[in-house]
Amino acid sequence: MLVCGVDEAGRGSMLGPLVIAGVLIEKSKIPELEKIGVKDSKKLSPKMRQELYKKILRIVDDYKIFKATPRQIDLAVNQHKLNYLESMNMAKVISHLKPSLSYVDSCDVNATRFGNEINKMTRRKIKSYHHADSKFIVVSAASIIAKVTRDNAIATINKKYPVGSGYPSDPTTVSFVKSWFSEHGKLPECVRKSWAPSKLIMSQTLT
């Protein structure tokens, strides 16, 4: 029986991509993930995530990653369809991997509704839960793949601009966005213009 776990990374960030990752594994091999120390990516150090990323890819049967760009995210937010963007990309991952059963981490307040939406797009069995990344090890594995991919994307942006982590709680990120907007009168392509913190910076700078 092939089982899939799907999770995202970067949803709350001001900049960079939203990453959706899925792993496919034979059910009998799941204990191997537990043996190497796989757990929710938020409970691991960056170094440990990097190490586990390589080990996970050696154990799983397949994996798939999709990235939503800041422009795609802005379009979804402006249409009030951010959850749909996430469910659509999760459906793409699942359709590519073709599992018998999928566990997904729900971003919708109604986890059942979120799972049903993905089911309609894939016609496959979906189990949708809040905090699935801490409840199911296959989703934990997916969370590590998503987080490392997201971290690598932010590292690439940092080679060009000093953006920090990309999150609104990071002073480096906020300082970069403020400085860029003050100097150029617009935000760079890597920044999500629809995000409330971005809008606040633009409004404060203009006043």
Image (cartoon, rainbow, N blue to C red):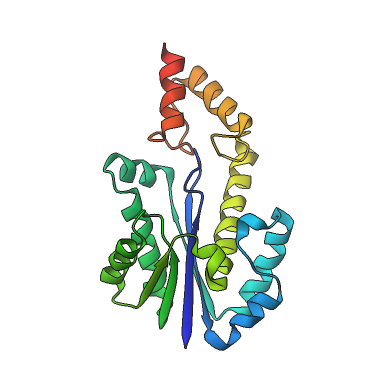
Give the residue drawn at x 48%, y 22%.
181
At which x and y percent is residue 175?
59, 25
Which one is nearer the viewer's eye here, 107 or 148? 107
Give the residue drawn at x 47%, y 48%.
11
Give the residue drawn at x 68%, y 58%.
44
In the picture shown, does residue 79 fall above or below 205? below
At which x and y percent is residue 69?
43, 48
Which one is nearer the viewer's eye here, 44 or 71? 44
Q: In the rendered picture of this protein, how many numbered marks are placed on residues?
A: 0
In the picture shown, does residue 3 fall above or below 153? below
In the picture shown, does residue 135 fall above or below 190? below
Give the residue drawn at x 46%, y 16%.
205
* Quadrant in which residue 199 is drawn: top left
Which one is nearer the viewer's eye here, 180 or 97? 97
* Quadrant in which residue 128 is drawn: bottom left
- Image side of residue 23 versus residue 68, left or right: right
Task: Report whether residue 132 is seen.
Answer: yes
At which x and y percent is residue 18?
47, 51
At which x and y percent is residue 93?
42, 68
Residue that extends furthest to the top in the rendered view of this protein: 207
- Image side of residue 38 versus residue 185, left or right: right
Task: Report whether residue 142 is seen.
Answer: no
Q: Which of the image's four quarters has the C terminus?
A: top left
